[in-house]
Image (cartoon, rainbow, N blue to C red):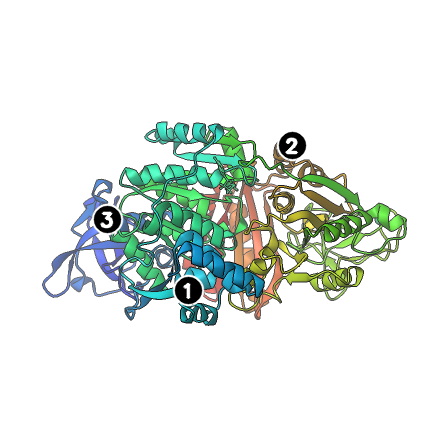
Amino acid sequence: MSGMFADVIVDISHEKLDRTFQYLVPEELAGEVKPGAVVQVPFGKGSRLTKGYVLKVTDTPQYDLAKMKEIREVLTDSSRSTCEDRLVALAAWMRGVYGSTMIQALKTVLPVKKKMRQKEKKSVRLLLEPGEARGKLAYYEKKNQRARFRLLEALLEEGEIPYEIVTEKLNISSASIRGMEEQGVLEIRAVPVYRNPVRGIAGPGAGTELNAEQQKIVDDILCRWDDPACRVSLLYGVTGSGKTEVYMEVIDSAVRKGRQAIVLIPEIALTYQTVMRFYRRFGDRISIMHSRLSDGERYDQFQRAKNGDIDVMIGPRSALFTPFPNLGLIVIDEEHEATYQSESAPRYHARETAIHRAELENARVILGSATPSLEAYSRALSGEYRLYVLKNRARNSRLPRAVVADMRKELLEGNRSILGKTLHSEMEKRLARGEQTMLFLNRRGYSGFLSCRSCGHVIMCPHCDVSLSLHNDNRLVCHYCGHREPKPVRCPVCGSGYIGAFGVGTQQVQELVQREFPQARVLRMDLDTTRGKDGHEKILAAFANQEADILIGTQMIVKGHDFPNVTLVGILAADLSLYADDYRASERTFQLLAQAAGRAGRGETEGLVVIQTYDPEHYCIRTAAAQDYGAFYEEEMSYRLVAGYPPARRLLSIHGIGRDEAHLQTAMEYLKRLILKIYKNHEGNVIGPADESIAKIQEMYRKVIYVKADTARELSAIKDRLEQYMEANEGYRSVNIQFNAE
Ligand code: ADP
Ligand code: ZN
Ligand code: ZN
């Protein structure tokens, strides 16, 4: 006997994954039995040999030793034939890298089985001849029946559209659909769920003919398909450069080889246009996931993938775990998006996890972005990923022109409005010409920092290079190291008394715009106006229908729909997110500005972007205005090197959550003490514990420790030691500790 015991789970489709059985680990298997291993165990009364998965190995038995059975065999990697085996291995890897329990990791990768009523799926099919339909279309337009117009227009193009896409992505109410059914324009058809809901719809169709730039990239990816050194590619191309066409071509080729593909797209960017492009190309072989699916629906979708009913799964982060039998390709569009990082344990990053899954299943990964993350771009430059660049927009529409409006000057000239002179006069021109404007209020990472309206100075932490946040008690606090100081009355740089927290919201902007331009039709999109189901789709659809001249919003408006009639984008407070208390603040700001700018001039007319800022010389603003990612990358990377943040170095954050603040503080301090003891190179590399930027949520206190190191291995070793320590200490039962490795 090895003296070791393994907790084994024998039925992963069980609703209670937590049901484990303990087995003895025989001496000769001791080296191989570890979390994620696939084993043969005798099970039940007859001791029938059953396949099981090891969740945990310990040296303390929990059952009567005399009754405990022994693991028979460890199935080696080559026998990992089922998709579940590989997903369990992936979960074990996630547990090891991101720190969580094996159960949490398993629940993340395996859908919970739920008994589902056999539901029927519906689709909407056009009944009219094209000529008739066009007559009806003109009628709807005359009557200003916009929803019906929009649906008929889509049906003319597609013939038949899944019901849920009509309601969710096109935002047509079921009343409108029924109305059109009564008029004999369309019919609603029911399709049993296990038949594909979109059978019979156009497709699979041929793709757009690629231009030379795109074709070269596709050819290169395909000709290196079997080279493991080229497993990961980064496709860096400005918005509208035709990345999606490249993905579809490569997916098509994988599917022809009998393999399947997963396409990750941030949920907010998963619009009707995008979804229909994939339907048009792959017809009924695709399926779409979104976060509002119930467990049962998600299970159903995964079942279809497992059964081979579909080839392509499109969805947000969680679609990464689609159990395809022969996965060939994972595409991650908008790879830089923060939503690819999970916020609950295991706090996995979809990019890293996708790459690991691809290694386990011998698949390829394509990352795509107009503003790649520093991680991805630095790895592409170093040759770890293969870099492909699309330099031009595919349809020859030019990138918009950008001007920087210096709001300090405006202030000097007596203009204290949030709309500067340039932006104001450009908006006037757009209204006169019947073109549309988008106003983007940057509030990302907004945490109540203090800035000087006269010189733009922001009060920073003397130790951390992040802005201090204003708390209710009128003190400034650093959320990284806990530094505190009183709020100054005058700007420490120029002495101006105009110093305060930026306090403008979208609603105030809307009121102002309405006052300045009484004739304009104004729409607002923010958390308040989008609360209902599909709230933001509705607003975007209305704007796309030109039901408004001006759309005001937060970061929500910078993604998704194409608005060909938008020729002006105004960015208010471009620098607001520069001082978020996060080392990625500049990177996020650059991405937002570049994306917001990319909204202008998608149609025939050249677009203009006005970037209003109190800090026009900041490299982030300058490079975003010049749409020069390369220059931004160089500057930002040199800061990361100096400050020791990823990707220059590696960072482990240890997040603690607890109801009792003093107890949490003690628990975190003990962790820090242990880190200092085991980490030789700790000088200046261990920061905290300090409050998180939101120090308390729903009566739970939140604290964080940061550990920097040169290699992921060092951090992983530290994490393992901390996990062992916490397991052996009672005090950690009442706090929740999560790890996040970057
Ligand atoms: P991205 O994914 O990089 O934003 P898209 O693939 O969405 O770019 O392409 C932008 C627009 O250009 C789309 O309307 C697309 O249909 C069109 N497009 C892309 N490639 C081509 C091509 N080779 N020929 C014509 N139009 C193209
Ligand atoms: Zn600090
Ligand atoms: Zn000042």
Callout 1: few (<14), some (14-19), or many (20+) C-alpha neighbours within 10 Å? some
SS at mark 3?
loop
Image quadrant in which you'd find residue 199: bottom left
Q: Nearer the N terminus, badge 2 or badge 1?
A: 1
Discs 1, 3 touching: Cβ within 8 Å: no
x and y percentages locating residue 164 in the rendered image = 41, 62
Determine which residue is flagged by label 1: 185
Q: What is the three-letter code of the residue carrying label 2?
A: Ala
Query: Left of 72 or right of it: where is 106?
Result: right
x and y percentages locating residue 64 in the rendered image = 21, 65
Distance between the Cα atoms at labels 1 and 3? 47 Å
Query: Left of 658 or right of it: where is 362?
Result: left
Q: Residue at x 38, y 45 (%)?
A: 281
The answer to whether residue 662 of the structure is visible from this angle is no
Determine which residue is flagged by label 3: 82
Distance between the Cα atoms at labels 2 and 3? 46 Å
SS at mark 2?
helix
Determine which residue is flagged by label 2: 631
Q: Residue at x 24, y 62 (%)?
A: 21
User: Mark 2 or mark 1: which is in front?
Assistant: 1
The answer to whether residue 27 of the structure is visible from this angle is yes
Q: What is the three-letter code of the residue carrying label 3?
A: Thr
x and y percentages locating residue 388 in the rendered image = 49, 31
In the image, which disc is placed on residue 60? Answer: none
Callout 2: few (<14), some (14-19), or many (20+) C-alpha neighbours within 10 Å? some
Callout 3: few (<14), some (14-19), or many (20+) C-alpha neighbours within 10 Å? few
